[in-house]
Structure formats: C-alpha cells, structure tokens
Amino acid sequence: MDAQVNPATQEVKRLQRLINDLVSLLALPAIWSSNEPAQIVQVLLDALLRMLRLEFAYACLKDPVTSAPIEILRIADSCKLQATPQEIGMMLSAWLKQAGDNSRPPAGSQFGKTDISIFPVPLALHGEMGTIVVGSERADFPNQTESLLLSVAANQASIGMREAELLNKQKRIANELDGRVAERTRALAQANEELKKEIDERRLAEARLLQEERQLKRSEVHKAAILDSSIDCVIAIDHEGCITEFNPAAEQTLGYRRNDVMGKHLADVIVPSSLREKHRSGFDRYLSTGEARVLGRRTEMTALCADGREIPVELAITRIPQDGPPAFTGFLRDITERKRNEDALRAAHAQVVQSEEQWRSVFENSAVGVALTDLTGRFIATNPVFQKMLGYTEEEFRQLTFFEITHEENVEHNRTLIGELLDGKRQQFQIEKQYRRKDGQPVWVRNNVSVVSGTERMPRFLMALSEDITQRKLSEEALAKARSELANVARMTSLGVLTASIAHEVNQPLSGIITNASTCLRMLSADPPNVDGARETARRTIRDGNRASDVITRLRTLYSKKEPSPEPMDLNEATREVTALSLSEIQRVGVILRWELADDLPPVVGDRIQLQQVIFNLIRNAVDAMSTIDDRPRELLIRTQRDEGNQVRLSVKDSGAGVTPQAAEKIFDSFYTTKTDGMGIGLSVSRSIIDAHQGRLWAALNDGPGCTFSFAIPCSPEGLSDAETPANRTDPADAA
Amino acid sequence: MELPKARGGSERPLLSVVDDDESVRESLPDLLGELGFAARAFSSAEEFLASDCLAQTSCLILDIAMPGMTGPELYQELKRRGQEMPIIFITGQRDETVRARVLKQAAAGFLLKPFSDGALLSAIKMALQDS
C-alpha cells in the first residue's frame, strides 16, 4: 500500500511523526521532574520502545550518590526474548567494552541467536552517567531519524538526570539545613527551659530568703525567750570583752543584776582575780592572731559570784557568726553539784576497784579452793588452789560442770542440796564429798556452797569454798581401821591375860586331880590296899575334873562368839561368871572382894560376851590399880543396881591409886595408860562396847582412896513391868 | 625309902601346908600321909601363924598368892620372928621372876601346880636335908 502513497505525503507523514516524537521526548522532562534517575530512565526506555518499535531497551546507570550500577530492561510485548536485566548486562558488557571508545559502533550487530541490530547510546557526553542500549529486528536500525530521536532522548535523559541529581543535592542540603535548624531550635528551647528553671529557683530562693527573714525575726523572739528561760547562764560579750547580754539564769547563778553588769568588762565581773590576767591575754591573743584556746569547746573554770564565792563552772564560748568586729556568747553552767557527785562517784569507784582488787586477791591467794559456777553447775571461775587440787586448768574447768567431776555416790545428794539452795529453802550448805581429779585420783573435799545473788551485769551464781580433807579422811579411815584392829588386839590381849589367870584357875583343880590321883594310886598299891581312902580320892578327882571342865566351858563361851548378838540377859549372872574367872587373879594380888548384886535387877538386852569383856576389863584394871598398894586394904566392890531412867548400873570400886580428874576422861582414849606394862586399850574398847548398847561408861573418884568405874545400860522392855513393881524395888543403898 | 628324922624326935616329920585353895588343903595332906609324913593344912598365913605347929613343922609347903598375907610375906614374918624353917613354895602362876626371888630368899624348893608326887617327894627330901 505504501507504494501507492505519494512519496511527498509519506515524507510529510514521516516528518510529522518525527516532530510528534520529538515533542513527546521534549515533553518527557515534565513527567520525570523531581524523579529519581532510575525512574527517568525507565520512562525514557518505555517511550523509546514504543516510539521506535524496538525489541528491547536496556540501561545501565551509575547511582549518583552510591555509584552502584542500576540496570533497567524494557522488552517489547511481541519480543520472544526472556531475560533479566542482569543477563542482558552480562551479554552486552563484553561488546560494550569493545565498543567503549567508539561512540558509534557499526549497526546491525548480532545479539544472541536472533539477529537484532543493537545500538548503544551514551548518557552525558562520554557516558559518564551510564549507557542505554536499544535493539531492533530491523537491519537498517537505526536510521537517521531514529539516531536523532535516540540522541535527543539521551540528551533529554542526561539533562533530566542531572537536574534530578541537582535537585537531590539541593534536597540533601535543605534537609541538612532543616536538621541544623531543628537542632539549634532544640538547643534554644532547652536553654530557654533552663533559664525558666533558673528564674523559678531564684524566685523560690527569694521566697525562702523571705521566709528565713521571717524565721530570723521569730527566732530572735525565741532567742530572747530561750535566753530568759535557759537553765544555763548565757553571757554575751562584744569584741572589747564588754558584756552585751546577761540572762536571768546568769543573774540567779552568779548573783549579779543584769542592769549592773551590762556594758561592764567581763574580766572585772565574773573572772576571779587570779585568772583575770590569763583571761585578758587569751582574749587579746585571739583578737590579734585568731588563735583560740577556749573557743568552740567545753572547758571547766572557776567563776566569781557577786557574794565573793568561787564556783566551778562548765563553759562553752562560741563566736557569734556576724560581720564586723567579733562578738562572743558564753554558755555557763554551775557544776558544783556535778563536781561533788563526780568526786563521790570517783571515790566510790576507787572503793569498788579496791574492794574488787581485795576480793580478787582473796580469790587468788585463798588457802582454800574457790569455785564459781552457774546454776547448772558449769564452772565460771576457779582459783589457783582449786585448780591445783583437781589438776584442771581454768579453761578446762569452763568445759565442765562440778557434777561431772563429783563421785557418783555423792551426785544425787549434791543435786538435792543445790535444788534446795536454788529454791531458797536454805542459805548455804556443807557437803563432804569425793571429787575425781583429772588424773583419776579421788580427792575428798568439804564444800561450803552458797548462792550469790546476781547483779544487773551478772546473773545468780553458785560459790563453793572447797577444802581438801583427803588427808583427814584418810586419817579417819586409818583410825577406824586401827580401832577395829585395836579391838581385836584388845581381845587377844585380854585373852592372853585371861589365859594366864585361866591357867591358874584350871591349874587348881588340875593340881587337885593329880594329887588325888597320885594318892589314890598309892593307897591302892599299899598292903593292904586302903580302898576307902582310894575311893575318896577318886571321888575328889572326878569332882575336880568337872570343876576344870566348867572353867574350860566358860572360857570357850567367852571367846567363841564373834558377832555381837543382843539377847535378854541377867547382868548379875554374867557378873558372877566373869568374877569367877578373875577370882584367882583377885586372890593372887591379895584383894578382898565384895559383892553387892541387886536381887531385883531387871534383865538387860545386850551381847553377853561383850558385856562380860567389859566387866572383866574393869575388874582387871581395879586389881592392877591396887597391886602396888601396901598401906591400906586392897578392896574390890562389885555392885549392880537399878538406876534412874530404866537403866541398870554396874560399878567396880577399888581402893587403888585412883586417877586425877584430868586423866579421868583421857583414860578412855586408845593408848592412854598410866600403867607401865599395859596396853591402855581396854577402856577405849569398853566404852565403844557400852556406846553400842546405848549406854554410858564413866569413871569417878571415890570419897576415900581409889576410884569407881561404872556403866549404865537400858534394861530390856520385857523387864520393865516387873521392875516397876514397888515390891521388887530395892534401894541401892540398902544393897550396899 | 629312907626318910629323914623329924624335928622334935617324932617318928614322922610334920609338914605344914598353907594354901587358900580348898582342893589343895584337901588332897595334899593325904598324899603326904601316903608318902610317910605327918601333915597339917592351913587356909591362910594368919591361921598358920596362930597355930601351935610352927615349932614342930619340919617343912612348910606354902602357896605364894593368897588373899591377905601372901606366901613370901609369911616367910618374912617367920624370919622376923626367928622361926625360920625349910619352905617349898607352890604356885599356879608360871612367873619366873617370882620363882627367882623366892628361891633367892632361902626357899628350899619351888613347885609349879600341878606337880607330880615324885617332884614333891624330891623337893621335900632336899628341904629336909638342907635343914
């Protein structure tokens, strides 16, 4: 159809289209104004694609800010090419480099498998802003018109992009400016705020100042009130030392009238004359050098009263904080009373210290052990004697209670006593008990325990004064043992003595037996035999044999029993038996024996053998006491009688040398003896036997020569009814 | 057995026994009789001194321990009276000091009770020979 069209008409149409395209391109900046470069290029590429009926249009730009490459690809809807902008960029890059300097590469270049004429268009003069590549299937692409359009388009784009770049730069600057303005504004606002605050504070300060002023006024009123009512003396002076204030307390304490002293020099008023010079020099020194010795602290001084008295005062001087010449306030207090209290307190304290020292000294140097424990018995303090006594140190004691070192047998009793002490049932108690030393050895102690009432600082505690009586206990034990041994020895001794006298006793019938038997034999051997005589002597032999047998029996009875066995017995009978055993001894010494045995004697309950030993002892002693007497008869009186208080008495009276009153008690002690050959144990054993019978054994000097030993023991309860019958009672005097 | 002659020409010499023990006074004279002596017994020294036998007694058999005057005291008394005679002390007490003392004081013999008839006879013989 085109061939039929008028070429001129065609040329006109082409030119018109060209003008339209050019107008479109020139109008583009209106569209893309203020747009980003990428958007400008995009619009441009779209316009070229449509205008030139291109297969594709590609652009590679440099980001004006970051210089990063931006690739954009536009492909015609009819085109079968499918690629991303990066893929196209890769394909073109080699060719682009090659064609770098050649701004106009030859048309009709191959692109991919399809024959596409591609044509590069630099942006800006030498492509500084990037490159546009366009491709068309037409082999003659680009023709003259198309080249013109492309270059115009590229030019337009370059201008648009530059403008956009400029715009961007302007924007950035504007933004920056805006930021700076904003910042400055903020700073200004803050400054403003601070200023406001400052103003407020100033206002507040002014208000406060105002209030303080008011308070100051009020406090001056207060001050006056304080001055007037103060217990302390308040005296103010100016820089010359003249009194400017003198409150009522000062008037009262020191006796001056305010009106009289105001304006006067302080030193002339209350400073004692002896201290005036010192006061003046101190005051002057302060004024000239500022060196203060009394300022700002409490000192004790002497003040002179109006009546001439000097009193101790406590003084505190402060400088009045004010401008101008210095002024001072003195606070002064009469401390006479306090001084007195202090002195008393000091004296009391000294006394306490002294008494504590004394007590400590007593504690430390005491000859007896002293232990302080708490109420559970735990040791608090122990003195050296106590520590030495038990072998523990002070520290070790503190881990112990005294129960832990007390012998098991004593603990229960000890605990009971402590309980009574703490309950207030007793003030103190004494206990003899056994401690166990640290080394395990037993220690006997006598403890005097009391509870010490507590003080504010110290709760109640127990105090034990402890005396080591181990030696005494051992002695006692030894004594008890010795006594029992002595009793045995006494028995053996009296047995020995008895054996001698028994021998005599037995020898007499024995002597008769032998003599009679000899005679009997001789009579039977005679010619003719004297049968009658022999019968008589044989009869006497039997009789004497029986008599000897009786003696032996009595002896065996006397010494066979060991354990005391109380039984009702007739004291008269027992006395007769013993006397019979002693008879030969009595006769040997030439003693005349008399009996006075009461007929109505009630039975007694006792150990027959023991009582007979006592009687035997008394008789033997009496006989011995008379063995050396030559100038008077040796007389022995054995008497039994009823005594007062349902007692039976036996007395053995001799006419011997007697005992002195001093010796009368001592003779009952073991080993005391006036005899040169005696053991002196008979009487002590005798007394212990009588004691065991609830009786009494004693000695008394006779009116005449010699003395009487007696014992009295209770009669048996069964015997009482008989004995009480008056008919059976015989006065002892009658019996004598 | 040859017996010494009694003082005073009698056939049988008189032996006096002084002892407070009845059994001795009872038995000893019979034995002495069997031994061929005349014998008299006294219960105390005082009784003997009061008797009429002092001069006729050839030998005195004397107990040492007696109530009242003892044997040694009787010896002293006889010596004081000049009527000394041989004395055989007899005693039940085995006391060596007494034995030594009485023998020293011119006792003719000392017999401890009980004694055998043989011992008694030899003591009597000795005593009578000494006199």
Image (cartoon, helix red, strand yellow):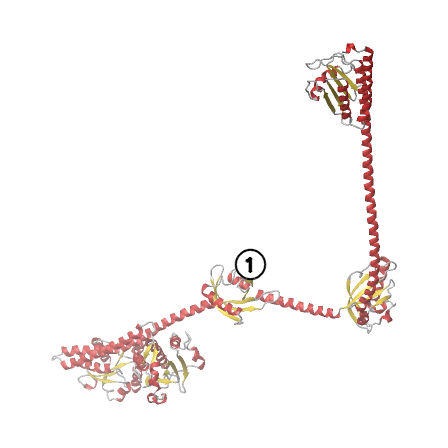
Instruction: Determine which quarter of the picture holds residue A222.
Output: bottom right
Query: Could you say which is closer to the camera, residue B46 or residue A536?
Result: A536
- Left or right of A210, for residue A343: left
Q: Within the image, what quadrant is residue A709 found in?
A: bottom left
Observer able to see residue A635? no
Residue A193 at x, y = what percent? 82, 46
Element on which disc 1 rests = helix
Residue B120 is situated, as x and y percent measured from the top left of the image, at: 22, 77
Percent from the top left, x then y, of residue A631?
37, 86
Q: As rendered, which of A468 and A680 lies closer to the eye?
A: A468
Q: Chain of mark 1?
A: A
Q: Residue furthest left?
A: A528
Q: Amino acid at mark 1?
A: Glu
Say which quarter of the image contains residue A615: bottom left
Q: With respect to residue B90, does A291 lie above or below? A: above
The answer to whether A218 is drawn above or below residue B57 in the figure is above
| Relative horizontal placement of residue A599, taking residue A60 as reference (left or right) | left
- Residue A146 image position (x, y, % from top left): 79, 15
Judge by depth and name the residue closer to the eye, A628 or A625: A625
Q: Residues within 10 Å of mark 1 (few under 14, many from 20)?
A: few
Q: Residue at x 76, y 25 (%)?
A: A38
Of all residues, the one furthest to the top in this rendering is A3
Give the vertical position of A711 relative to A727 (above or below): above
- Decide which of A606, A702 is in the foreground and name it: A606
Q: Considering the image in quadrants, where does the N terminus of chain A appear?
A: top right
Quadrant (top left, top right, bottom left, bottom right) of the C terminus of chain A: bottom left
Residue at image coords 44%, 82% = A661
> Which residue carries the number 1 mark?
A395
Q: Residue at x 82, y 30 (%)?
A: A170
